[in-house]
Amino acid sequence: MKKNQRKRERILIRRLVDGLAGWLTFKQAGAARTLYCEHFLYPPIYEIASGRGWSVLAQEPITTSSARSGAPSTLDFVFFEKSRNIQRGSRGLIMIEIKYIRGDNITLELQGLYDDFTKLRTAVPNVLRSAKSLSSCGDPDKWQIVVAQRKAYNKISRSRSKKFPEIVKLLTDALSDKPSQLLYRSIIETKLKSDFHWHVIAIGENRWSNTLS
């Protein structure tokens, strides 16, 4: 049953990657004048996941940690299945962090990615505010999603960072002809200058958990 659970989770991640790239290209075609950021991506993420039958928790508090302001740290998204047709313990559960890359401060953005990976690594269902709703789910599938236009993505993936070389390698691998397992991507090319083409990358836990210290 766990294999079927993982299959459903991976299908959703692939659809999110494709859908986000398409949605951003659509907004770009309509000359959307907005400040692109992680929160700008919340509506399409919610619509894709909920439309495919998943329950969606956004900015889900982690009850065992607190930010400097005193507010609890949060996960960008938690998705879970509630279907009664799925056996208890094999219901899908996904934890996601989203990072929008601008390419303005590579060191700061690499640090942000490192912090996201660290948060995902340590997050478990029973420390989330909605732990009771997640108690019948299986083990979580954890993903980091990176969104950027080509110019910004190339800038960070070609960085010579001495502090975060493993993260740079993950981003570089995503652009290879045959990306590694649990590394999904969608790149939509348009008539615009290639620097403005959207890149959406999803990196699964098993791809990064053993390489980041």
Image (cartoon, grey):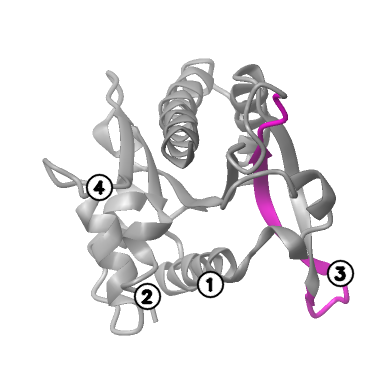
Q: Position of residue 37 (x, y in %)?
A: 60, 46
Range drawn in magenta? 65-83
Whole-angstrom CA distance, mark 2 to mark 1, is 9 Å
Q: Nearer the viewer, residue 134 or 40?
A: 134
Q: Can you identify the residue that label 4 sits on? A: 181
**From where the camera sits, is residue 98 visible?**
no
For label 4, count other residues whose C-alpha is less than 10 Å away and answer few (under 14), some (14-19) or many (20+). Answer: few
In the image: residue 174, left or right of residue 84: left
Instruction: Say the numbered circle drawn on residue 71.
Output: 3
CB within 8 Å, label 4 to label 3: no
Q: Amino acid at mark 2?
A: Leu
Front tag of 1 and 4: 4
Q: Amino acid at mark 1?
A: Thr
Q: Residue at x 19, y 46 (%)?
A: 179
Instruction: Please count the marks in the image.
Output: 4
Compared with 166, 33 (above or below) is above
Whole-angstrom CA distance, mark 3 to mark 2, is 27 Å
Which numbered disc, 1 or 4, marks the residue that appears first in the sequence? 1
Instruction: Say the numbered circle drawn on residue 212.
Output: 2
Q: Amino acid at mark 4?
A: Gln
Which numbered disc, 3 or 2, marks the residue that appears first in the sequence? 3
Instruction: Say the numbered circle drawn on residue 118.
Output: 1
**Secondary structure state at the residue bearing disc 3:** loop
Q: Nearer the viewer, residue 181 or 82?
A: 82
The verdict on residue 71 being magenta is: yes
**Secondary structure state at the residue bearing disc 1:** helix
Compared with 68, 178 (above or below) is above
CB within 8 Å, label 2 to label 1: yes
Q: Residue at x 27, y 24 (%)?
A: 189
Instruction: Say the numbered circle drawn on residue 82.
Output: none
Name the quadrant of the C terminus.
bottom left
